Image: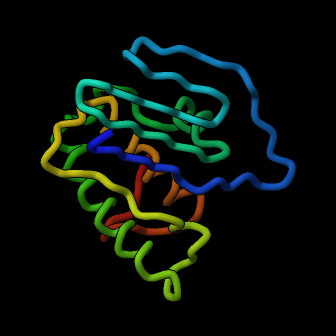
Amino acid sequence: MKNLIYIFVILLFIIGCSSTNQSISTTNENSTKTSDTIRIANDSLEYEVIIIDGGFNSWLYSHARPRGFYSESYLENRNRIYVNEWNNRARQPLQYNPNLYEMQINYDFNIHYGYEVNYLIYNYFIYFQITYKQQLAGFVPRP
């Protein structure tokens, strides 16, 4: 795939953390959720997003603002800030924990990914900052 986005975000499973193996289909085309893995794919745009992090899926449904709460432009602008900071930290493993920032995020700001992708990426960044006590921008993340 040409524009492949892999947010193969940190396989952080805390000892004793249990996850379900129940598969849930959503109404989004080519989108599935399995345990704490969220995968979104769109063959026409040739991208794929994979978010893997123990606890994110349950956090998303219990703490995140509902879909439609934020505008798409708001999500895109915040994601631009978060992706830039994330990638800066991923390039500096001696300064930032390489276990948290394992790889860079290939997010092309010139591609329109749609609301669902931006919503999930934005909420992952919020979850990440709250859970791992990180601050990716000049403002405190809010769920």
- Which residue is pictured at 29% across the width and 66% down the height? 84
92 with respect to 55 (left or right): left
Q: Is residue 71 above or below residue 68?
A: below
> 37 or 79: which is nearer to us?
37
> 121 or 49: which is nearer to us?
49
Q: How is the image coloured?
A: rainbow
In x, y percent, where is residue 122?
36, 46
128 with respect to 16 (left or right): left
In x, y percent, where is residue 76?
21, 46
119 with respect to 114 (left or right): right
Occupied quadrant, residue 41: top left
Q: Is residue 116 above or below residue 8?
A: above
Occupied quadrant, residue 89: bottom left
54 with respect to 98 (left or right): right
Q: Quadrant of the N terminus?
A: top left
Tally the marks. 0
- Which residue is pictured at 49% across the width and 87% down the height? 95
Task: State the residue lying farthest toward the bottom.
Answer: 94
- Which residue is pictured at 49% across the width and 32% down the height? 39
Task: State the residue lying farthest toward the right.
Answer: 16
Occupied quadrant, residue 91: bottom left
Q: Is residue 9 above or below residue 37?
A: below
Task: State the residue lying farthest toward the front.
Answer: 1
In x, y percent, where is residue 10?
59, 56
Q: Quadrant of the C terminus?
A: top left
